[in-house]
Amino acid sequence: MELLVLVSLCLLTFTGKTFGDKLDQTPIIIKEDESVILPCSFSTSLTNYRFDWKKDGKDVFLYENGRVNPSSPDEQFNGRVSHFPDEVKSGNASITIKQVKVSDSGTYTCLNLDGKEEERQQIKLTVGAFAKPLVSSHITADWALLRCEVLDASPEPTVVWYDSDGNNVSDRKPEVRETGGRYNIILETKVTKTDNYTCVATQNELNHQSNKTTSVNIKGTCPKPTIRIIEKLNNGTLVECKVRGVFPALKMEFQNRANFTVSAGAPQPSPNGINEYILRHYVTKEDHYHCVVTQDNICHQISSEENLVHVTSELKDTTGDKQTGES
């Protein structure tokens, strides 16, 4: 209970509102199924007077002549609303609503009916149902159809598909259906590249964002390795092979110009990307080297271009990444 009071007071502080701001709507945002305190306070004791809570024309809570009127609440609020009886004498007309629902969202009005002058305060309550993306994919030899579903979210989230570089790859508008303030959203997009794709659902009103990632391996596309010189060490040279857009079912190896394997091993995830893999080797003999990537699960193999590696001569700035081509 102390936590609820503290949350409500903090919200009032952040918005710059006070209990005395009549007709200004104090915003409160809360997650569905939690309890919330709607704050309301007047300068005089309410023990022998009447205060009334209403929401968009519906009766929420009625206190009069020292007791609660049990027949007052609308069916929507029956059994879920309580007040602070020990604080009525100090003018506290705040109420607590248990297990709030999206349908509880709206404008609440607190009225002090003391027989002299009516006083009122208003609160804007937003009850949110967090968006939780569900993703699936249909993959062919040349493309994949990605599907993201967000069900029973409120308020309406923004849904976008991104690739691993953070590019928006959504190629069509989402299908949106709304019932009772809840939103069901389906967003499909077609991609043609092997990658990791993430569906992101954002609800700015709730400061909430959720995502779900799926891996897509399109068999018709070819991973393209590059080979480059990293640095010269003593009487050898450290070379690196990097491949992007593939997944763990692969092997990588370095070969010389005679296509003899000089090094092979398990590729390691690159620190620069979630779907990049690298293999490094210490070359001690000058030759033309290339990198070969094999995917046994789809019977696919591809090679980088050859790179002349000097062992005894100094490295030149021109020994950078080279784009790949199939062997």
Image: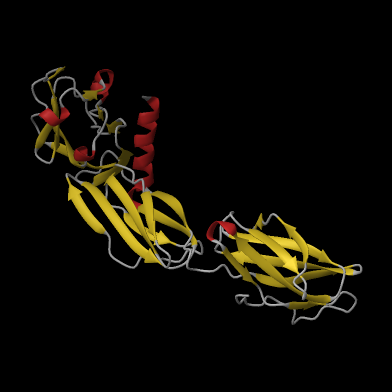
Q: In the rendered view, does 268 fall on the left or right side of 126?
A: right
Residue 235: % across, % down: 91, 69
Quadrant into which the C terminus falls:
bottom right
Q: Decide if residue 239 is in sight here.
A: yes
Q: How is the image coloured?
A: secondary structure
Seen at 23% across and 55% down, the residue is 176
Residue 94: % across, % down: 25, 29
Q: In the rendered view, does 224 fall on the left or right side of 49?
A: right
Residue 216: % across, % down: 46, 58
Quadrant into which the N terminus falls:
top left
Q: In the rendered view, does 122 fall on the left or right side of 139?
A: left
As drawn, 148 above or below 87: below
Question: In terms of depth relative to the viewer, which is nearer, 16 or 217?
Answer: 217
How many numbered marks are there?
0
Question: In terms of depth relative to the viewer, which is nearer, 23 or 313?
Answer: 313
Seen at 42% across and 50% down, the residue is 211
As drawn, 222 above or below 107: below
Residue 22: % across, % down: 21, 43
Task: Kindly indicate the quadrant of the structure image that contains residue 261.
Answer: bottom right
As drawn, 247 above or below 286: above
Q: In the rendered view, does 324 fall on the left or right side of 35?
A: right
Question: In terms of depth relative to the viewer, which is nearer, 47 or 294?
Answer: 294
Q: Decide if residue 113 is in sight here.
A: no
Task: Kindly indicate the quadrant of the structure image that contains residue 247.
Answer: bottom right
